[in-house]
Amino acid sequence: MPGFFKPNKQLKRKVHPVPSVHCSDSNGPIGSQSQSCEGQNLQNRSSWTDFQSSSAVQDTFCMEQLRESASDLNLQPGHVWPVDLLQQRDVPRAEPATAPEPNLSTHLRKLNCCSDVFQCTLVNIPQTLALLKQVKLPLGLIFQPFKDSREPPLLITDVPPRCSTCQTYINPFIAFIDQQHWKCNVCFSLNDVPGNFLVDPMTGSYCNPHSRPELQHAALEFMVPLEYQAKRPRPVTYLFLFDVSYNAVETGYLAIVCKTLLENLDRLPGDSRTRIGFITFDNKVNFYQLHSNLSRPRMMVLTEIHDIFTPNEETLLVNLQQSRQLVVALLEEFPVAFRETQKTLCAFGPALQAAQKLLKFSGGRVTVFLTQLPNEGCGSLQPREDPGDSTLGAKHLGPATNFYKVLAMEFCGQQIGVDLFLLNQQHIDLASIVCLPRYTCGYVYYYPAFHHIHSSALVEKLREEFRNHLTRSIGYDGLLRIRYTQGLMLDAFYGNSFLQTTQMLSLPYVRPQAEFAFQMMIDGAVTESLLVVFQSSLLYTSCQGERRVRIYTYCLPVVSSLSEVYAGANMATITGILSKMAVDRSVSLCLASTRDELIKVLIDALVAYRASACSPKQSAFTIPRSLQQLPLYVLALLKQPAFQTDAAMSLDERVFTMFELMIQPLIVMLKMVYPDLYRIDDYLNSEPADNDSMEMGKGTMKRPALIQLMAENLALQGAFLIDCGNVLYIWVSRHCSSSFLDGVLGVTNYTSLPGTLTSLPILQNPASKLIQAFLGSLRKERLYHAPCFVIKDDSTSRSVFIKRLVNDRTETAMSYYEFLLHLKERVCG
């Protein structure tokens, strides 16, 4: 098998029934089975579908129930339409919204979890490992357990019953053996039906259990009863760490950040108990006393950074409401307090240790601003960027020291999350310090060469991202469990978290955009059931101090034929899993090895299909329609700057790009790999009625048609927008219409337009408002703010736009057509 798909021995573990795990804040397993009600006897059976008294019927009742719902499963061989890659090169786009439907009945599809929460590379699960190996495709799962889904979870009042063996919550895809027992669809254990589960909570009369919300909805949420909580949930705590060294003062970031924080101080998620604190650092570490009985803030300087000591926590982490005036005074003072500093050293490591000591009992969210390479005290680093070394691998892309990884894992154990805002002018060794957000559910916000005057686009990006960082709803103090049907096993994990076991992740805090991925393997055969289920259960504390559990259950069919497996291949999710595998391999080995392996994965998949297809035209270069985009997206990954050995980018930029590929939501990651290209000058004249209603915030934004990423599609009279996920570019051709130039760009003719604009002007006319609304719809709900740059056709910056045209040939990479010819030679001989 390809190297990407080799089992990770440390994670390889057969999924057997596991014992109940008690959370640290609970007195017992939530949803444990209750005793049956007295009087539950023959007279109560009338509310059920008639049961037969025959034991043989009861023994097979679970299978009969499945067949009732799945009687119209398309279990006949799926239709796989072969596509000739060379003759049909106009490839439809891989979008999560167009993922293939699993081979389920209409009834089960309606019950299933929304596909924007769970996505699987193969929506029809191979029955055996041999079948999975035969298709040479990864079996992987990408999911967002806290997503603001288009189908939000149903809030219920009761705690759902759980399997007494593996703790899986009851769900719409379980089967009842008889009136008093249900069969778990993860470990296949039999469980007693709680007596209160047969009672309608509104009328008090006995009811059909299938009408219960737990069996009608695959997305549920409930509040944890007080009897399951050992103590009251902890308040939300925010701790801000500011770099105030000479380099930091020169960037001018502090005034921007403090102003943004002041503007959003009352919008911080939390309740009346929310706490806040501040630490600054240069060659020393400074604390700030903000207790409400003080008349003004007091700064305490810690000169001994090799033995961190923290003063009284109660005066440093204060109630935001009670000490609000002191917090405001401190934020107003920060931008001028260090204006005359000449201290160039950066005690980043000691500042983190101070934060850990402050939060070790309360947990919390640490937001760090850093402008230079840490060079004082513990965690000091040395520059290690080598522009002449194109074999980048573990030596450069991995951490130079274990200090930050060890500290991050300690943070995670204490429920402390860390976010990094990096505003460096020179190398900062992101590969080493990225461990902090990597293991604590945090994020990296990167602003290379930031300056408050000379980089206006980065200033806007910092404002927008910091504002979103402050105000976005979060869950904290979380514990995420993922359970899956016996016969599957976890092979690899990708995401910003610490994997405590093969089924449990610790989440100091979680955002709606948080995405996790698993690479799965089949251990033996999935033969116990016609269906496989994946269930995520997130135990977290809301910003209102409520302890909650959010449950998503995703059901997929088990199939036994190659055609059904191919018909259910989800190209978008396959690309997502391959990108994460590529990042993982680059860090552990080297870029060259990653590129070779990506091509090998593609060739193996093509050869596997060729071997399985009974085509009389043996010379035909075909692939299933479901995989038609695979060659294009593998080529796009090979052209990704993160995986190019000759890419003119700094080491920090490469590491950040890899970090983005790992943590960006799938829909954004796909745009990073293969951007969306639109023609927008013609768009201004289309659908005027719909566009007018959209400008007023009504209706749905209708977008222009997507265009293939080829230079031949860039008309000399047009204006084009390319959405790269994390950045937007507008290309203005030489003969672009004057109405677009005047209405959108605010210039009278092409020659008046600067070579590159770092932002799109906001004008008070319908054309400008429409384009601004279109950009807003593209940026909506993104983790990072995507700045928009305007580039002229004859600008020196035109290469920035041209290199995004993946289908075209470059000096160092093949065009899509050349790539297909190369593949055909390797596959067909």
Image (tube, helix red, strand yellow):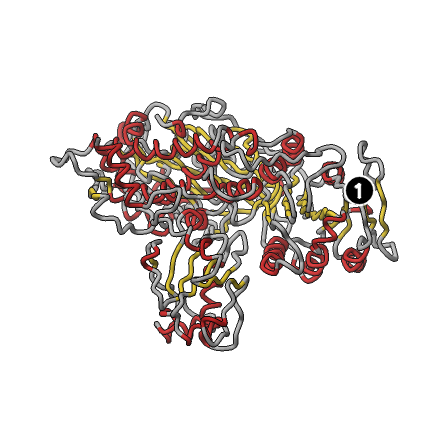
Residue 85 vertical position relative to residue 267 in the rendered view, above or below: above
x and y percent of residue 494 in the render? Answer: 49, 36
Residue 246 vertical position relative to residue 705 in the rendered view, above or below: above
Between residue 642 and residue 784, name the one nearer to us.
Answer: 642
**On the image, numbered disc 1 is attached to which residue?**
285
Q: Quadrant of the N terminus?
A: top left
x and y percent of residue 785 in the render? Answer: 54, 56
Q: Secondary structure at mark 1?
A: strand
Residue 624 vertical position relative to residue 290 in the rendered view, above or below: above
Is any atom of residue 189 visible in this view?
no
Is any atom of residue 299 visible in this view?
yes
Number of marks present in the image shown = 1
Q: Quadrant of the C terminus?
A: top left
Residue name at image x 80 percent, y 35 percent: 305
Residue name at image x 42 percent, y 50 percent: 803
x and y percent of residue 342 in the render? Answer: 81, 48
141 on left or right of 306: left
Between residue 579 and residue 272, name the one nearer to us.
Answer: 579
Q: Residue furthest left?
A: 616
597 on left or right of 57: right
Dividing the picture into quadrants, the one containing residue 264 is bottom right
280 on left or right of 205: right
Residue name at image x 43 percent, y 53 percent: 151
Which amino acid is tagged 1? Val
Between residue 257 and residue 587, name the one nearer to us.
Answer: 587
Dividing the picture into quadrants, the one containing residue 259 is bottom right
Residue name at image x 42 percent, y 57 percent: 722
Between residue 147 and residue 56, name the one nearer to us.
Answer: 147
